[in-house]
Amino acid sequence: MADILYTYKNQVYANITNRCNCRCTFCIRGHEDGVGDAETLWHKKDPTLEEIKAAIDAFDFTGYDELVYCGYGEPTCALDILLETAKYAKEKYNVKIRINTNGLGNLEHGRDIIPDLAGVVDSLSISLNAPDAEKYNAVSRPRFEGAFEAMLSFAQEAQKSIPSVKLSIVDVLPEEEIEACKELTAKLGVPLKIRKFS
């Protein structure tokens, strides 16, 4: 069975689904079977609520204060299980909850999911990937029309009820695109995190 919880660079991650509504050109899924101490992050079938809770109970959270939902899929594609297990980990192990997401959860579910996340999730890291819709569509290859605009709107709205919301890019983008992303996020009023490509 694939790893449900795994560690990488002194953080613990929850890999709860392999479903995703994007096919990003840079996605590590196309190059590696696992990340960090995970042998594989490919689930034969997505884990159940009970299996994820068992993995949380089996993990020693000593020295970890945050559980990050990020694996070989988009966590909000498994929204109900994400919320249930996040509440469970938060209450039982006193960890903060972060979701690394593509920000397309509202499009995925056809409704505003932010009220569901509020009160459970402490921080969101939303993949911006590009400074405009054309470049975003080329690199992220989302399943939905209007994904770029929906993702930006999600980021702005989430700030109203989730303590920490950041848009993120990877430092391999051309310098002019990084600058354009800085300008865009400043205009939106959402902080930008520039991640090192690893």
Image (cartoon, rainbow, N blue to C red):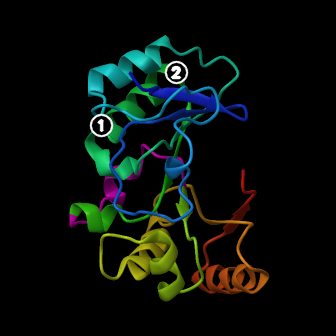
Q: Is residue 18 above or below residue 141?
A: above
Residue 122 - label: none
Q: Amino acid at mark 1?
A: Ile
The image quadrant that residue 26 belongs to is bottom right
Extreme-front residue of the structure:
31
Extreme-left residue of the structure:
110
Of mark 1 and mark 2, the one earlier in the sequence is: 1
Residue 93 - label: 2
Magenta-highlighted residues: 110-124
Residue drawn where x is 37% and y is 65% of the image: 104
Q: Nearer the viewer, residue 138 or 94?
A: 138
Indicate the secondary structure of the residue bearing disc 2. helix
Q: Amino acid at mark 2?
A: Tyr
The image quadrant that residue 147 belongs to is bottom left
Which label lies toward us, 1 or 2?
A: 1
Residue 197 in the image: x percent, y percent? 72, 56
Residue 78 in the image: x percent, y percent? 30, 45
Q: Is residue 33 above or below residue 144?
A: above
Q: What residue is disc 1 on?
A: 81
Total label count? 2
Q: Nearer the viewer, residue 123 or 171?
A: 171
Predominant secondary structure, magenta span: loop
Residue 81 in the image: x percent, y percent? 30, 37
Q: Is residue 87 above or below residue 105?
A: above
Viewed as shown, does residue 178 lie left or right of 132? Answer: right
Q: Is residue 118 magenta?
A: yes
Residue drawn where x is 31% and y is 29% of the image: 47
